[in-house]
Amino acid sequence: MTEKDLVVSANTEPPERLKVLLVEDDTFLEGIAVQVLSHDFEVKPVVDGETVLKEATTFMPDVIMLDVVLPGEKSGLDILDDLRANHAFDNAAVIMFTNLSDDENKKRALTHGADAYIVKAEFNIGNLGNFIRKYVAIRRAT
């Protein structure tokens, strides 16, 4: 095998199969996101904020896609604070994935440790996999 063959084979390996914890209470949007991601990622959907930390602890995701508005007492922003206070999730990228486009929620999310803030209505869901890989790489580099 020549050096050229090694370079070609190294570039053709499939990307790492990252674990995505998808926290979304809208079953329609959850279904679309799972469909888009499940081919290249291991996806675990969670519907409410009350079970996120428990599921995250057992699943140990590489990325957490977190809606801001969730059923129950905790918002996605409250859960973000819980995640960032728990050092077990220091290497997990957190991407807020919401319909709230106001600057106040976006600023709070980013200052409290979110890696990115996506407004669902303004985002091409087909780009979600590349977006996730980008922010996982950034998180791992820090």
Image (cartoon, grey):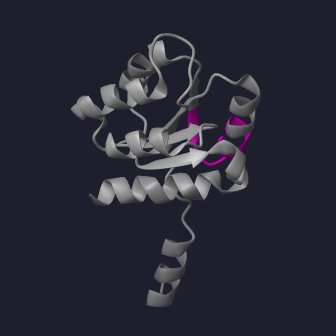
Residue drawn at x 52%, y 74% as measured from the top left? 11
Q: Residue at the spot x=46%, y=13% of the render? A: 50
On whether residue 131 falls in the magenta region, the answer is no
The quarter of the rendered structure image containing the C terminus is bottom left
Residue 141 sits in quarter:
bottom left
User: Which one is in front, 62 or 12?
Assistant: 62
- Relative to 46, say whether 91 is above or below: below
Q: On the image, which quarter does residue 22 sit in? A: top right
Inspect this view and state whether residue 93 appears: no
Residue 80 falls in image quadrant: top left
Estimate the x, y position of residue 60 in percent, counting from the top left: 39, 32
**Where is 52 relative to 98, above or below?**
above
| Rendering coords of residue 133 (x, y %) | 50, 56
Which of the two residues, 31 or 76, is positioned nearer the viewer here?
Answer: 76
- Mark count: 0
Image coords of residue 74 (percent x, y)? 44, 17
- At x 75%, y 37%, the residue is 32
Q: Position of residue 115 (x, y in %)?
A: 41, 49
Q: Is residue 19 left or right of residue 26?
A: left
Range of magenta residues:
34-43
Residue 88 visible (yes or no): yes
Residue 42 magenta: yes
